[in-house]
Amino acid sequence: MVTIAIPFYNAEQFLSLAIDSVIAQTYSNWQLLLVDDGSKDGSLKIAQKYAQEDNRIRVFSDGENKNLGFRLNQIPSLVDTKYLARMDADDIMHPKRIQRQIEVLEKYTDIDVLGTNAYTIDKDNIVIGLRHKVINSKQLQRVKGFIHPTIMAKTEWFKNNPYDMDAVRMEDAELWYRTYKKYKFVSLSEPLFFYREIGNNYYKKYFLANTSKQYILKKYPNNSFWKKYFFYTTIKGIIYRCFNLLRIEQILVNRRNEVLFKEKKHLEKYL
């Protein structure tokens, strides 16, 4: 059995779509844990309504706003299934996501963390493209990092490898860097996820990634990887900001994805 965990904060615009995509999974032996981070909108009511209608869905809410890192570390303590899958409240799963990941993890037991490729969508659920271009025919690719909300691993792995809550806005990147040499990270080249990227003010994503710059550089002193990381995120942030001022930021968002016009019509049934 697998638990799919969705932490959410003020996510009423997209939360129902995320939950519906879990319910639509071809793999049925799942539990859904919805973790509220002190939402002020109607998100909690939406989550509670689903929980009343489906006993596989559970809501956890303590009424407090603790931020994402805290909730990500709290989730494994609330889970008793063998596997735990991540998901964000504004994304959508492909119906076969959980089935495919369970199949791979059960077959290849040496894999510690398994992610997937993802289609990118905008605020209107229109497919923009493919997040990672497939460069060869291999279904399973050894990786050093993931599209964060696509990952699945044994619940025990998450318990043994907590996120660094001080690495604000980049908890995932810090975790991958800290653990990839010790564990086997693999990603399915198959896109089994719809990852939402919204162009408006997208530049803020890069500037916010720098909020933990001093903390990370202090934690990893004289580390060339992190120095390059923050240099490039700063440059990207400046470029996106310039395009934002010209009101053409979406052009850059589209360029970072492989556009798949031929597949768009086929994918509409999942959105």
Image (tube, rainbow, N blue to C red):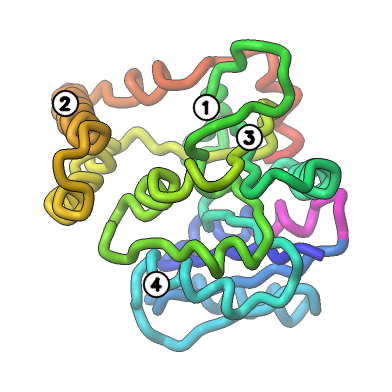
Residue under label 3: 187
User: From mark 2 to mark 1, how far is it between C-alphas?
Assistant: 20 Å
Give the mark toward the camera: 1 or 4.
Answer: 4
User: From mark 1 to mark 3, how far is it between C-alphas?
Assistant: 13 Å
Label 2, residues with CA under 10 Å away: few <14, some 14-19, many ≥20: few
Residue 75, image x and y in percent? 55, 72
Give the mark toward the camera: 1 or 3.
Answer: 3
With respect to residue 259, does 28 lie above or below? below
Residue under label 1: 131
Give the mark toward the camera: 3 or 2.
Answer: 3
CB atoms of marks 2 and 4 within 8 Å: no
Which residue occupies 17% across, 52% down?
211
| Disc 4, SS | helix
Residue 244 in sight: no
Residue under label 4: 70
Which quadrant is the N terminus positioned in? Answer: bottom right
- Classify residue 81 as left or right of residue 75: right
Label 1 is placed on what type of residue?
Arg
